[in-house]
Amino acid sequence: MSNNVVWHKHVVDQEVRAEQKSQRPLVIWFTGLSASGKSTIAGALEQILTHQGYHTYLLDGDNVRHGLCSDLHFSDADRKENIRRVGEVAKLMADAGLITLAAFISPFRADRRLVREILPEHQFVEVFVDAPLDTCRDRDPKGLYAKADAGEIKQFTGIDSPYEEPENAEVHIRAGDVTVAEAVNQLLAYLHEVDVLRAGYEPIQQEA
């Protein structure tokens, strides 16, 4: 960074924006293997939060690679840069007073820790969407595991590129054992416990 670049502090800051929205800014970071259910659970949680009057934004791994990170591939260096960029965007969104949900494989602990460290204290929640590899293979909605097994995709997380499981995630969702509704209720209960949600939040109904 150039020595000529100086941070400009504005009068309207995160505190003002959060007060305007009557909510606590937060980044909820969903990590897990491809097809573990990260985007599905994050999307369902965002729907509930929006319905209950919260201001949110969902950053999705595939979506950002259509624009912000369209120049990146899947080498370790590019994965790191992908998460660095998304982390900076999530930080800006939290500064805007939003509850930001981010659903990314983000396979490396160091990269997830970097995002945590650039945010103010207590504004990063790591959610481990834990689904066994065999479950993810069975789901395989995009056919990516089949392509990886056939050698058509290289450096695929869980196959020929490692996934480093969180060691101390704030929320651990055993996605192979629970429904989407149960996962969302687990998250709502946690957010209520740490005073992110206003009193009187409503769990969603269990799926039939």
Image (cartoon, rainbow, N blue to C red):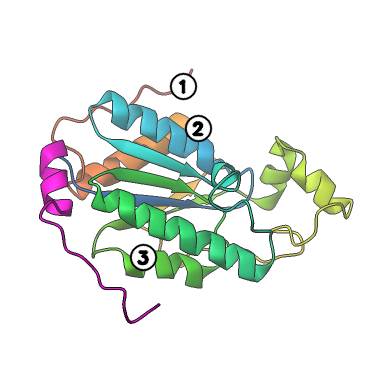
Q: Answer with left or right where residue 196 lies relative to residue 159.
A: left
- Measured as percent of width and height from the top left, residue 37 is found at 56, 40
Magenta part of the protein: which range? 1-21
Of residues 86 and 134, the one nearer the viewer is 86
Q: Answer with left or right where residue 123 lies relative to residue 174.
A: left
Label count reads 3
- Name the residue rendered at 63%, 43% in the picture: 35
Amino acid under disc 3: Arg
- Name the residue rendered at 64%, 48% in the picture: 34
* Residue 29 appears in the figure: yes
Of residues 78 and 147, the one nearer the viewer is 78
| 14 within the magenta span | yes
Q: Main secondary structure of the magenta part?
A: loop
Label placed on residue 179:
2
Circles 1 and 2 in contact, beta carbons < 8 Å: yes
Residue placed under numbered mark 3 in the picture: 116
Label placed on residue 207:
1
Local secondary structure at mark 2: loop
Q: CA distance from mark 3 to mark 1?
A: 33 Å
Q: Is residue 129 above or below residue 179?
A: below
Outermost residue on the top side: it is 208
- Name the residue rendered at 26%, 45% in the picture: 191
Local secondary structure at mark 1: loop
- Measured as percent of width and height from the top left, residue 124 is found at 32, 58
In primary-sequence order, the first of circles 1 and 2 is 2
Mark 3 vs mark 1, foreground winner is: 3
| 75 within the magenta span | no
Outermost residue on the bottom side: it is 3
In primary-sequence order, the first of circles 3 and 1 is 3
